[in-house]
Image (tube, rainbow, N blue to C red):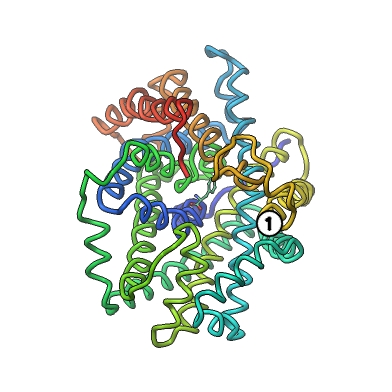
């Protein structure tokens, strides 16, 4: 007899693990800098709209696919598409997801590794020394990125931690880690938000974020907001599907999805409040917004009382957030090997983890460490330079939106109304008009919006 599928121990276990997946570098690193580049206000409003109209319905859809099938990303389509239009072709959506998980994890872990270095430096006092001379910090960061040994070392450490947790499985590994790390993360973040209330830049930060000025928003900014909503919610590649397959039937999918999306959004906005309050407190010029997290923040942290403590706390927060995301990426790939290839969990996590670690070294040395790999550029745009730039471009601009579109179409048009309704009301009770609203969003609104992203990418826009 087949072994019974592992389950989260309860509602909280699922919500914390899934929120852990969603909350990560996307919230703490990417969102603040793209918000900064897109001049705040109006961009934030569009982002919130994208989360509500596209993110939430697709999050619900992914969890429905996982819980209904009790399978990994590929298996879910194999089971649910049986006898339906398109048949086993739909498994391709699952394969795309597993491949995307593999690719994203390989480079995400490189950036996540930087946080380990920063925690060590904050604790040892080295960061304080550098942060008093912004040019030194900039120079240090450049050297750090182009040092292949260090990049591979910290990437490997982060992958090691990820593999170590996923190895122990859903309950003893993933859920336990989420229950330990998420409360710490939320506490540190709340402390930093409260801290930012007292910085002189707080008012300006709030105006920047919440006073929309639509003349400052470009068309590509609108689409960037939409694309980012996939990345930040871990949608479009089966992460939420896989976690949903471990969800108990007696828990409510809509309620869980709303909680996860709300938490993710609150954290992204909080990260902006913290960073912009601190940055606006000083006459500080942000030269390169994509490295705010590593070259600007330490400088400003150390101009404030308790800088060493605040910065150590901050990088621990970023590391924990990234770890609960890398866990979910590895679980997508591992659960595929476990269900579809019949591997035992330990073999699946070790083998797949090792393969991803090895593949990730290409990204690790493409930050300047190896000239050829750093300069390679298939797409030919500045932001797509190097293996890292290329992979991030492909994953965020193509794989996630295409995966998300296909997931929406499958759930909205291939699964029957009754099937989805039954799964959604299970553990929740009758949904009434809310079900009709979701069904409209998943069949029409979400595919139209995502279709617009994809068309515009084809026409040459870029979302980074
Ligand atoms: N959502 C994560 C973040 O914001 C990244 C991620 C994407 C994780 C896709 C899993 C799947 O950092």
Q: Is residue 282 above or below residue 158?
A: below
In this orientation, which residue lies closer to the viewer: 180 or 319? 319
Which residue carries the number 1 mark? 368
For residue 130, what is the image quadrant? bottom right
Q: Position of residue 54 (x, y in %)?
A: 36, 36
Q: Is 415 displayed left or right of 375 in the figure?
A: left
- Is label 1's Cβ within 8 Å of ligand 1? no
Q: Is 337 displayed left or right of 269 in the figure?
A: right
In this orientation, which residue lies closer to the viewer: 338 or 121? 121
Q: Is 190 displayed left or right of 434 in the figure?
A: right
- Binning the other alpha carbons within 10 Å of mark 1 as few (below 14), some (14 to 19) or many (20 upward) gives many
Identify the residue shown where x is 36% and y is 25%.
448
Identify the residue shown where x is 58% and y is 21%.
90
Quarter of the figure with the N terminus: top right
In this orientation, which residue lies closer to the viewer: 153 or 300? 300
Q: Position of residue 319 (x, y in %)?
A: 56, 66
Q: Is residue 405 above or below residue 257?
A: above
Q: Is 374 displayed left or right of 317 in the figure?
A: right
SS at circle 1: loop
Q: Is residue 162 above or below residue 310?
A: above
Q: Position of residue 345 (x, y in %)?
A: 74, 48
Identify the residue shown where x is 59% and y is 71%.
139
């Amino acid at each position: 007899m087949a072994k019974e599928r592992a389950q989260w121990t309860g509602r909280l276990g699922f919500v914390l693990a899934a929120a852990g997946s969603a909350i990560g570098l996307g919230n703490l690193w990417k969102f603040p800098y793209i918000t900064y580049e897109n001049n705040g206000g109006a961009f934030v409003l569009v982002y919130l709209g994208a989360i509500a109209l596209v993110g939430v319905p697709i999050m619900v859809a992914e969890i429905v696919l996982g819980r209904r099938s009790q399978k990994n990303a590929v298996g879910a389509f194999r089971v649910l598409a049986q006898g339906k239009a398109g048949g086993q072709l739909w498994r391709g959506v699952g394969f795309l997801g597993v491949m995307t998980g593999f690719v994203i994890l390989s480079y995400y872990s490189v950036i996540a590794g930087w946080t380990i270095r920063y925690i060590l430096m904050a604790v040892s006092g080295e960061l304080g020394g550098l942060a008093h001379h912004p040019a030194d910090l900039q120079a240090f960061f450049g050297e750090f990125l182009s040092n292949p040994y260090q990049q591979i070392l910290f990437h490997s450490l982060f992958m090691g931690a990820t593999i170590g947790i996923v190895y122990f499985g859903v309950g003893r590994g993933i859920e336990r880690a989420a229950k330990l790390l998420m409360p710490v993360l939320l506490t540190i973040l709340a402390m930093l938000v409260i801290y930012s209330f007292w910085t002189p830049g707080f008012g300006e930060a709030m105006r920047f974020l919440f006073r929309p000025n639509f003349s400052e928003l470009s068309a590509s900014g609108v689409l960037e907001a939409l694309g980012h909503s996939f990345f930040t919610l871990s949608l479009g590649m089966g992460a939420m599907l896989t976690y949903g397959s471990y969800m108990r039937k007696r828990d409510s999918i809509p309620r869980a999805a709303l909680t996860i999306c709300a938490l993710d959004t609150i954290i992204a906005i909080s990260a902006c409040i913290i960073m912009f309050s601190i940055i606006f407190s000083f006459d500080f010029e942000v030269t390169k917004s994509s490295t705010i997290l590593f070259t600007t923040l330490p400088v400003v942290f150390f101009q404030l009382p308790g800088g060493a403590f605040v910065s150590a706390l901050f990088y621990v927060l970023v590391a924990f957030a990234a770890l609960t995301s890398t866990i979910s990426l590895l679980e997508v790939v591992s659960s595929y090997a476990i269900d579809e290839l019949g591997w035992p969990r330990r073999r699946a996590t070790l083998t797949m983890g090792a393969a991803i670690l090895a593949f990730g070294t290409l990204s690790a040395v493409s930050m300047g460490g190896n000239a050829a790999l750093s300069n390679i550029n298939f797409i030919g745009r500045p932001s797509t330079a190097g293996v890292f730039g290329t992979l991030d471009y492909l994953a965020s601009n193509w794989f996630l939106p295409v995966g998300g579109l296909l997931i929406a179409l499958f759930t909205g048009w291939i699964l029957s109304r009754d099937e989805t309704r039954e799964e959604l009301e299970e553990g929740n009770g009758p949904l009434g008009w809310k079900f009709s609203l979701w069904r409209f969003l998943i069949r029409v609104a979400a595919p139209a919006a995502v279709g617009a992203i994809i068309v515009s990418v084809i026409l040459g826009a870029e979302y980074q």
